[in-house]
Image: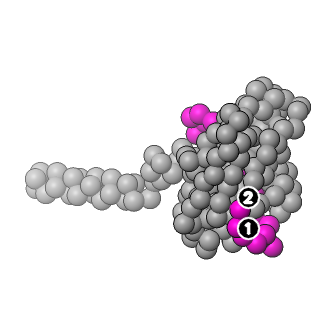
Amino acid sequence: MNHLVNLVVVVLGGGFLGMMMNTLPGYDSSLQPFSVHAGENDVGQGRLFTAELTGLRSSGTISYAQFGKEVVRDTSATFLVAELAISAREMSQEVEAIWLGATGRQYSQSARLENIPRGLSSARFEPGLKDRAFAVFELPDDEIAGGQLVLMARGSMLMDSAVHLPAPKVLPGRQASLRLEP
């Protein structure tokens, strides 16, 4: 009888443990930034910064000047250039961006264009001063429509806010070449 009671306790404990493992969120999903969704053509207000998507442009080739030399980059996909207006709220802030595609895939900024003029990866924003920056992504055409730009404070701010800026309903046509100016 005693063995039967022990067996029942172990089976029930295992059942409860299995139920908890399947119903509780995992570490990756429980420690995510809080989503702040801005409406189309609205300003997204996170805890540490405010941001506005002022324009989107797409191209197969991007050119810019760097240290007096002309730099040209091309792609077999599409360069998506997000034009942003960002302001820090309380202290100097750096911001990073991802593009959340129509299929749910996440695209980081293109590492081949880190040194562009006014690039988001090298920008620092100050409180009360609205500054402009570019975030450039390299992605397939079908990921642009229905996608959204997600901005977060740079660093490990897991429990902070992530500002979601939707793409406009009418997307601009793809240009053959795009020049980025400071």
181 vs 157: above or below: below
* Alpha carbon separation for disc pair 1 and 2: 7 Å
Q: Place residue 100 in its image quadrant.
A: bottom right
Mark 2, residues whose alpha carbon is within 10 Å: few (<14), some, or many (≥20)? some
Query: Residue 38's x, y, as percent?
Result: 80, 56
Mark 1, residues whose alpha carbon is within 10 Å: few (<14), some, or many (≥20)? some
**Marks 1 and 2 in Cβ contact (< 8 Å):** yes
Query: Residue 86's x, y, as percent?
Result: 81, 41
The residue to which callout 1 is attached is 175
In this view, the residue farthest toward the front is 69
- The answer to whether residue 102 is seen in the rendering is no
Q: Nearer the viewer, residue 132 or 127?
A: 132
Query: Residue 130's x, y, as percent?
Result: 87, 38
116 vs 101: above or below: above
Position of the N terminus by quadrant: bottom left
Taking the spot 47% from the left edge, 48% from the top edge, the residue there is: 28
In this view, the residue farthest toward the top is 91
Q: Amino acid at mark 1?
A: Gln
92 vs 95: above or below: above
The residue to which callout 2 is attached is 178
